[in-house]
Image: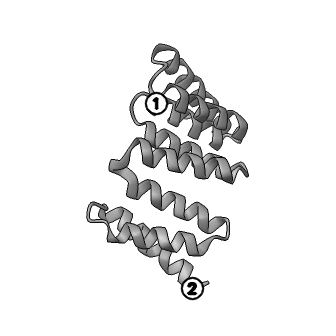
Amino acid sequence: MATTRKSGTSSEARIKELKGALVRDPLNVNLRLQLATALESSGKGKESLKCLAESVEKARRNLGVAHCTYAGMLMKSGKPDDALQNYDLSIELDPSNASFYLSNKAHALTQLGLADKAKSIYEQILQQKNTTKETQRIVIKNLGQIRKR
């Protein structure tokens, strides 16, 4: 007879597993991002935010992604000024993914009621030749939502 785990139990097991992996590989940013996501999913927003802050401090690779993810959590935590600063840092640290980071920043600006600034960024992204198809799709969708308002 099969037994099922409660989602909270499996979430706690995943968190424990990721924390153990980080003990063995403390500079692994991807593990830290996974842990932050697991913590957030378990309703541990403050601990998730702390984990993301640590990932930014300890990151050696994927530093742009770390800052961008941290910025998203800062937005959710009601800290938009810090979030916008981290979006800018992600762009500065990893210009090869600037379109992706700019798209996230524009989305944050829209959430803050700054649709004109967001629209300007989205239009700038669409003019860039190195923007991925997925980022273009997201930008076009978000621009359409702004125009409907």
Residue at the far top in the pictured view: 24
Kindly state the secondary structure of the residue where label 2 is placed.
Answer: helix
Mark 1 or 2 closer to N-term? 1
> Between residues 100 and 82, which one lies in front from this camera angle?
82
The quadrant of the image that shows the N terminus is: top right
Rounded to the nearest angstrom, the CA distance separating label 1 from label 2 is: 38 Å
Q: Quadrant of residue 15?
A: top right
Q: Which numbered dot is residue 148? A: 2
With 128 as the anchor, is 46 left or right in this view?
right
The quadrant of the image that shows the C terminus is: bottom right
Residue 26 vertical placement versus 85 (above, below):
above
State the residue at coordinates (73%, 52%). 78
Q: Are marks 1 and 2 in contact (CB under 8 Å)?
A: no
Q: Which numbered dot is residue 59? A: none
Residue 47 seen by the camera? yes
Type of the residue with mark 2: Lys
Type of the residue with mark 1: Val
Residue at label 1?
29
State the residue at coordinates (47%, 14%). 24
Task: Residue 33: give x, y in percent of width and height.
Answer: 51, 36
Q: Quadrant of residue 35?
A: top right
Residue 111 vertical placement versus 38 (above, below):
below
Residue at the far bottom in the pictured view: 148
What number of labels is visible? 2
Residue 70 vertical placement versus 21 (above, below):
below
Task: Give the crowd class for mark 2: few <14, some 14-19, many >=20 residues within 10 Å.
Answer: few
With 131 as the anchor, is 20 left or right in this view?
right
Task: Residue 74: give x, y in percent of width and height.
Answer: 65, 47
Residue 89 vertical placement versus 84 (above, below):
above
Task: Give the crowd class for mark 1: few <14, some 14-19, many >=20 residues within 10 Å.
Answer: many
Residue 6 seen by the camera? no
Task: Residue 43: give x, y in percent of width and height.
Answer: 71, 42
